Image: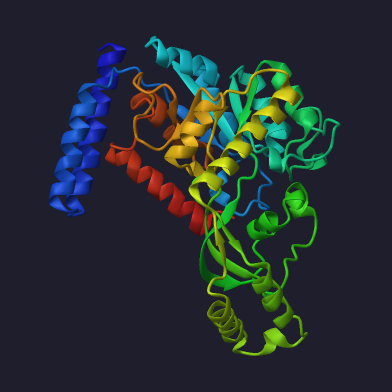
Amino acid sequence: MNIRKTERTLRWILFSAGSLFLYVLSLESWGWFIWFIWGILTLQNWRQNRIPVLMFHSISDQGDWIRDQSLVTPLKSFDSQMKWIARLGYKGVFLDALYEMRKNKQAGCHCLAVTLDDGYLDNWVGAFHILKKYNIQATVFVSTGWMDQPHLLRPKLPACRPSQINWKGYLGPAEIAAMQTSGLVDIQSHAVSHDDIFISDEIVNFISPDNQPHGLYCYLYPDQKPQWLRQEIKSPLGYPIFKQGEALAEKAFIPDPGLIKQLVNAAEPPDFFASPDWKDQLINRVNDYKEIHGRLGDMESIHQAKQRWQTELIESRQQLEKLTGKPVQHLAWPRNGYHLESEKIALNAGYKSTTSILGLHNTPFNPHQVERVAIVSINNPTIDTLRILLEIWVFKGFYIFWPLLFLLQRLSKFYVSRYKK
């Protein structure tokens, strides 16, 4: 039995097993039927030129400082994954090559793209050594607002033992330039802010001694972003936390400074938060302020939002191009949050492609939209490697309509959120 026939047989077995599982779960009948028919159609057309794009974030054994542990892949798992990718003959490509292959409908057999988001320091400290070990090219998407200050290269593997290395923090200019020069890593844009912004006047909470979100701290004090982990997070007590959304997907709500001043002043007494009704007191002040002034702040117009989006997207490109000395033409939206208008702005600003959540899985039809498979580790190198090989070898990254892989994604995220420390 040749390789293609083996692959095809395996696809049918796994698809049938997953579909049977969904049927046993007694999912809504029409939804299951539509999913089943769509799966059969895509299974029949599995030879389409789909090129898997894998999305990693932090690569570290000391990633406890990262608030979302689903973003952390241990070194052993990443090493095993890259080893088997190389052993099976897959070639890592940069996004420029991916774009050209899709645009020209070239065969992408045994090609994939490895991407790492956010620009964590451990991409240099640990991941870079593993990529070099197996000669796999990868793309690092950097949020320039989170770049660290050091202009000197910091210690990394294998020159130093893991215990001698600082794993916490974000890439600085020196590491970014060094990885780009290596030819193994291509630096691309993850925008500037990577912020959750206020998007309405709906207040969901207040800053208190027991509630100091680091994301809000970084939003209020953007110059402190790279240093937040090295200092005490101390936002103004009583500050209102409005409903939040993605910076490049939503119009921003700007709170009235007068409201902020009143709430912060009200929370200033040392014993204020000892009162059981402190939150009601702040809410009453908010209601009084709105009754007097008619509003709690101003909402951006779509024109203002588009100007802010354009400024951020252009600034990110300019900063990274200055550091790397080469064009920056690809963008990963932070947390995949974008607006149709912000996508148009990005393409008009010179980006060839942006990440997408449309489910096209990198067929030749839309080369400017790149869909990625999120890799979530459960801290077991064997299982982590088997799942990633299932993604790229069997289904070519086209996992969302495959019940078994869909289930594996959900189980991995559940395991990480509940058990991973």
Q: Is residue 117 left or right of residue 155?
A: left
Residue toward you, 174 or 238: 238
Q: Is residue 40 left or right of residue 323?
A: left
Image quadrant containing the N terminus:
top left
Image quadrant containing the C terminus:
bottom right
Q: Is residue 386 above or below residue 28?
A: above
Residue 331 image point, x, y percent: 55, 31
Residue 29 image point, x, y percent: 13, 50
Work out whether residue 383 can be spotted: no
Q: Is residue 209 above or below residue 195?
A: below
Residue toward you, 257 or 29: 257
As drawn, which residue projects farthest toward the right?
152
Q: Tell me how the rendering is colored.
A: rainbow
Work out whether residue 92 can be spotted: yes
Residue 389 image point, x, y percent: 43, 28
State the residue at coordinates (73%, 28%).
176
Q: Is residue 72 above or below residue 26?
A: above
Residue toward you, 370 or 27: 370
Residue toward you, 9 or 59: 59
The mark tally for this picture is 0
State the residue at coordinates (23%, 23%).
9
Say which quarter of the image contains residue 191: top right
Say which quarter of the image contains residue 105: top left
Say which quarter of the image contains residue 165: top right
Residue 65 image point, x, y percent: 68, 53
State the residue at coordinates (75%, 66%).
234
State the residue at coordinates (64%, 19%).
327
